[in-house]
Amino acid sequence: MNYDIKDLGLSEKGKIRIEWAGNQMPVLKLIKERFSKEKPFSGVKIACCLHVTSETANLCDALKAGGAEVYLCASNPLSTQDDVAASLVADHQISVFAIHGEGTKTYYQHIETVLDEKPNYTMDDGADLVSAIHKDHKDLTEGIIGGSEETTTGVIRLRSMEKDGKLLYPMIAVNDANTKHFFDNRYGTGQSTIDGILRATNILLAGKRFVIAGYGWCGKGLAMRAKGMGALVTICEVDPLRGLEAIMDGFSVMPMEEAARLGDIFITVTGDIHVLRKEHFEVMKNGAILANTGHFDVEIDIPELTGLATSKRRIRDVIDEYTLTNGRKINLLASGRLVNLAAAEGHPAVVMDMSFANQALCSEFVVKNRDSLEKRVYDVPKEIDQQVAHLKLSSMGIYIDSLTAEQEKYLSSWEMGT
């Protein structure tokens, strides 16, 4: 079996870690049990470019139980848990190509290695696999049934490809499932980002001016958690509806040019490039803390920050202190990468249970419907979204009402009146 990981000797620790996460992922466990019997992925090679964590390990295990050959590489060099990678290879016989802290060259080499296996299905977290295929490996699309995408950033990329007529095989926008972004993006990102900031800095949030760039579902969850810990939350937005929503939710809203002078902590969560840049760095307070929880490390203009600095030093495990020409110091967390994964452990397993349940079921949907799907981006089928929600509720011992026949008729009819 081919693989490239840090140390196979870490497998025992990783095995326990995977088991712990699996105990908090009951929906995926039920899906795995069914997959084990039905084998929906027999003969299918699945290439995954995901965060190599204990939660992802449980997803890969479920796919393999369904008959798939699974090949996994990292979607972020700093999120890989080396012990988990070792256990996937040693205990689950899954090919993994990921090393924590790997450089850019190795990162893309691992993607190429996975694509060398000629996959039939791609599973992305940021669309790097899809991008590599469409740029350099178009010949592979003849054997690809379809794929799925986990993130807002990736879905934006895919919809752009579809709009330009460049998408060469069907994709499911898993990120847009209600049971994904309502929970993973909001509660998962909200809690895990705060967790990463606190682990990295050990600061007190209460009373701090907490500036969030972006008020999508991730920004909403982060604002909620920061406010709950006593922070004074400011939102910076470019969308007037989201800006209005933030005001109505009780947060202050202003341009980044103004917020840059006031903030103690800055978090980018937009999916766009250079949200924090030179003109902002120049007016920030001494000791300002910068972090990113958007998918890629481009939201903070690090080259500009480096150019403004007279010196840089590693002041804590994942904090780089930049001293500017004006004498002020700016602290960058986790090299501008996802702070919730680079400085903590990412989303809690109980949240990823729903996201990965969607991934597993959407993969099955694409494989079963391969002959009827077009080369475009599909929403998650409503029945899958509903199924995941019902399974999650029942795993929590919670049950809900059902409509009576009379109620269903009333909601679907225009003749009954009021």
Image (tube, rainbow, N blue to C red):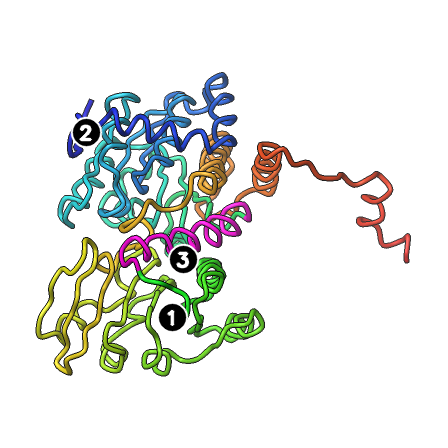
- Residue 356 in which image quadrant: top left
The amino acid type of the residue labelled 3 equals Ile
Q: Nearer the viewer, residue 372 or 176?
A: 176
The residue nearer to you, when weighing 171 against 382, is 382
- Residue 159 image point, x, y percent: 42, 56
Q: Secondary structure at mark 1?
A: loop
Left or right of residue 101: residue 44: right
Q: Disc 3 and disc 1: Cα gap in Å? A: 33 Å
Residue 320: x and y in percent read: 17, 62
- Tag nearer the camera, 3 or 1: 1
Residue at 83% from the left image edge and 39% from the top image edge: 404
Report how far apart the C-alphas of labels 3 and 2 lie in the structure. 31 Å
At a point 21% along the width and 71% down the height, the residue shown is 330
- Residue bounds of the magenta highlight: 178-202
Real-space Cα distance between discs 1 and 2? 45 Å
Residue 188 falls within the magenta-colored stretch: yes
Q: Amino acid at mark 1?
A: Lys
208 displayed left or right of 391? left
Label 3: which residue?
Answer: 156
Residue at the disc numbered 2: 3
Q: In the image, which is nearer the foreground, mark 3 or mark 2? A: 2
Q: Main secondary structure of the magenta part?
A: helix
Considering the numbered disc 2 on the image, is that residue within a helix, a strand or a loop?
loop
Q: Residue at x 24, y 22 (%)?
A: 90
What residue is disc 1 on? 208
Q: Answer with mark 3 or mark 2, whichever residue precedes in sequence.
A: 2
